[in-house]
Image (cartoon, grey):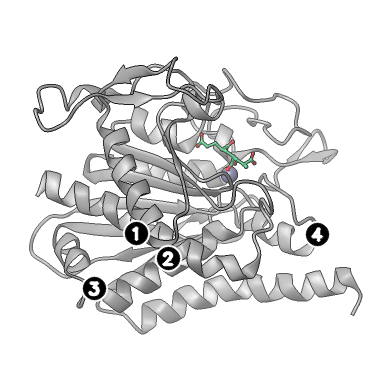
Amino acid sequence: LSYPLGMTAAGLRCRKSIYQWMTQIQKSNSKLVTQHYLGKTIENRTMYYLQISQPSDKTKKIIWMDCGIHAREWISPAFCQWFVKEILQNYKSDPRISRFLKNLDLYILPVLNIDGYIYSWEKDRLWRKNRSPHMNGTCYGTDLNRNFNSSWGSIGVSYNCSSEIFCGSGPESEPETRAMAQFIERKKSDILCYLTIHSYGQYILTPYGSTTKPPSNSEELVGDKNFGPLKIIAKGTGTDDNAVPILDLQMHVAKKASAALMGKYGTRYEVGSTSLILYSNSGSSRDWAHMIGIPFSYTFELRDKGSHGFVLPPDQIQPTCEETMLAVTTIIDYIDQKYF
Ligand code: PAY
Ligand code: ZN
């Protein structure tokens, strides 16, 4: 087979397999897992999310996690699937998982940008955006992580539709963004944590990207005797000369998560707000989720640091998922202990 044909065959496999996996995982765990409609993509594909809920009379709170906002970040949908599998395999034997499932429901969206994801398998491995046509079909794609209604279009975006960071024609101009935002908006009073999985860079990013101002719950640790001030270190300094001392609960929890992650294979993650440790951006889903009142909101940038970048070798899929699992369950566990 020539290379393009090979890509198409792989594309066909991937197009079917995540849908099939969702149906199968739901069927074989029907007491715990349900599959729900979220909306349609620009090319009319159906987006589903999975809900993992232990039957109970209690009203429970929600942890939301989405993967595959960006097409080329293949390790991200892989992690969402790994996460679901691990929870289902271990919820009886792992006391942490059994504990948090008593109070929390997990909502997992394995791929938001389905059209872009398939395009990255079939046509262009490094495609990032969705596949919406612009300017009479002369250019394609909006960056879904610049399209949310959080300081939309203000910084770290482009208005040029051929750019990788084109923010769209307006906030939530894209059906994928709109479907997810409307759903989360409806549920927001019950959602305690928003997680969005990207690659690469090895970061756990906290709000905000659009401003260097601290997030809303940054004062909550004031007066906590067991906890000293955290420092956010300005990127690129290599020292903490420019550090801004700040008490930030989301940072505190992210640090615990990165320590748990490192415990597995020694992989180092940097923790901090996007604007301070990466770059400024606006319209990201993470900023938006926190702005509408979700107390914990994080972007994960999974492996690696750039040697393979988006094309992470297959032998790193499992270790990446294993270590990320530890970080994510640390966050969920912290939230469970704090609220219940
Ligand atoms: O949520 O602020 C955020 C994360 C920022 C990401 C973004 O630009 O949307 C960072 C990039 C990403 O995962 O899309 C990083 C990768 C390596 C990229 O494409 O530059
Ligand atoms: Zn991304």
Circle 3 residue = 91
Q: Is residue 138 above or below residue 151?
A: below
Q: Which secondary structure, mark 1? A: helix
The type of residue carrying mark 3 is Tyr
Residue 220 x/y as whole percent: 17, 26
| Lower position in the chain sequence, tag 3 or tag 1 | 3
- In front: mark 3 or mark 1? 1
Q: Are marks 3 and 2 in contact (CB under 8 Å)?
A: no
Q: Which secondary structure, mark 3? A: loop
Q: Which mark is residue 123?
A: 4
Q: Is mark 1 within 8 Å of ligand 1?
A: no
Based on the displayed image, in which of its 4 quarters is residue 74 positioned? bottom right
- In the image, taking residue 18 as reference, residue 108 lies left or right, namely left
Q: Which mark is residue 326?
A: 1
The type of residue carrying mark 4 is Lys
Q: In 3D space, how far apart are the residues under numbered discs 3 and 1 (Cα atoms)?
A: 14 Å
- In front: mark 4 or mark 1? 1
Q: Give the tally of numbered discs.
A: 4
Q: In 3D space, how far apart are the residues under numbered discs 3 and 4 (Cα atoms)?
A: 39 Å
Based on the displayed image, in which of its 4 quarters is residue 90 positioned? bottom left
Q: In 3D space, how far apart are the residues under numbered discs 2 and 1 (Cα atoms)?
A: 7 Å
- In front: mark 3 or mark 4? 3
Q: Residues within 10 Å of mark 4 (few under 14, many from 20)?
A: some
Q: Which mark is residue 322?
A: 2
Q: Which secondary structure, mark 2? A: helix
The answer to whether residue 290 is visible is yes
Q: Are marks 2 and 1 in contact (CB under 8 Å)?
A: yes
The type of residue carrying mark 2 is Glu
Q: Is mark 3 within 8 Å of ligand 1?
A: no
- In the image, taking residue 268 as reference, residue 296 lies left or right, namely left
Q: Is residue 171 above or below residue 73?
A: above
